[in-house]
Amino acid sequence: MNVFIVLLVILLLSAIEVRNIVKHNRKYELAVYLILMGLGTILSVFIMYGVEIPSFFNIIEHVFSPLGNLILNFLE
């Protein structure tokens, strides 16, 4: 039930905002807004259902940690 209320509120607020964006003919802004609101809505629903979302910083650490160690070893 809480998910339904959140989705309804997001839908209503987005409808108002999209109407204003379309009225001013801002296609790029509309695309960015819809992508960000879509991602935010999906993440909100996942969090409300208790789905564990991996942190983006863990991915960055996993990618750049070997590079950092390589640079430290090179400088020594």
Image (cartoon, rainbow, N blue to C red):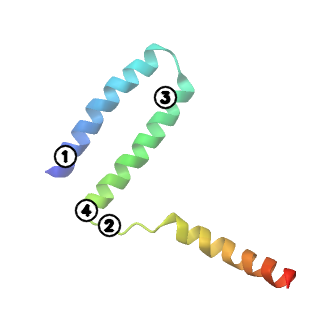
Q: How crowded is mark 2: few (under 14 residues within 10 Å), some or many (20 or more)?
A: few
Label 2, on which residue? 51
Task: Please give the label number shown on residue 30.
Answer: 3
Q: What distance separates the C-alpha of mark 4 from that of mark 1? A: 12 Å
Q: Residues within 10 Å of mark 4 (few under 14, many from 20)?
A: few
Q: What distance separates the C-alpha of mark 3 from that of mark 1? A: 24 Å
Secondary structure at badge 3 equals helix
* Closer to the camera in the image, 67 or 3: 67
Q: In which quarter of the image is the C terminus?
A: bottom right
Q: Which amino acid does label 1 sit on?
A: Phe
In the rendered image, residue 59, in percent from the top left (x then y), is placed at 57, 69
State the image quarter where residue 62 is shown.
bottom right
Q: What distance separates the C-alpha of mark 3 from that of mark 2? A: 29 Å
CB within 8 Å, label 4 to label 2 = yes
- Say whether residue 58 is left or right of residue 37: right
- Say whether residue 31 is left or right of residue 38: right
Query: Which is more N-terminal, label 2 or label 3?
Result: 3
Label 1, on which residue? 4
CB within 8 Å, label 3 to label 4 = no
